[in-house]
Amino acid sequence: VRAKDAKNFYMWQFKVEGDKAYLCPHVYKDGKFVNNSSIDKVEIPANAAFGIGDTVKAEIACKGNTITTTIDVPGTEGAVVVDTRDVSEYGFEEGTVGFRTGGSESGKVYSMYVLDEDNARLYRSNFKAKENPFSKCSISDGVLAVTKAISTGDLLNRETVKDFNSGASG
């Protein structure tokens, strides 16, 4: 989130350990993780918890210096805010979005959208088109496959966002 480039970004990791789900926010600055790991580990509350293979709607809202994370698991009571944090000390005020995975992590994305602070749509995809804005991921049958070991990040190109806004993509 707010990726200036592949060496400077916030990374929100969702993971499952045993029967618990976690959000692990990270800061990657100048090509290194700050504190060599996540800035902290937040246990997802039981009313929004998920397991390996579950479909989850995650919203990461960046407004000013605050990032709020909301999880919505189908079949539960609805969207739950699981984390709100001030990130002003790290200095990433703008940037693009993307995906990063470790050696054993992977995921599937069924749709994605990026909004500006006024909720105007900057980018949207349900991944049904053949066009793939992420060079290290693949698209098949309307699903973006985020493969294992994308260690340098796979960022949504700012030109793709500009093309979307001019009507050339979508």
Image: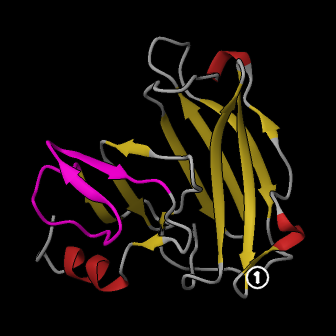
Residue bearing mark 1 = 91
Residue 159, placed above or below residue 3: below
Q: Quadrant of the N terminus?
A: bottom right
Camera-side residue of 149 and 41: 149
Question: Measuring 48% from the left and 75% from the top, which residue is drawn there?
Answer: 96
Per the image, label 1 sits on a secondary structure element best described as loop
Instruction: Based on the picture, tell me whether residue 128 belongs to the magenta stretch.
Output: yes
Image coordinates of residue 68 in percent, x first then y, are 67, 50
Q: Amino acid at mark 1?
A: Gly
> Residue most toward the front?
103
Camera-side residue of 18 and 120: 18
Question: Measuring 54% from the left and 57% from the top, which residue is drawn there?
Answer: 101
Q: Which residues are magenta?
A: 126-148
Instruction: Based on the picture, tell me whether residue 132 belongs to the magenta stretch.
Output: yes
Question: Measuring 43% from the left and 73% from the top, which residue is drawn there?
Answer: 155
> Residue most toward the right?
35
Residue 70: which quarter of the image?
top right
Residue 165, placed above or below residue 144: below
Q: Is residue 3 left or right of residue 154?
A: right
Camera-side residue of 150 and 29: 150
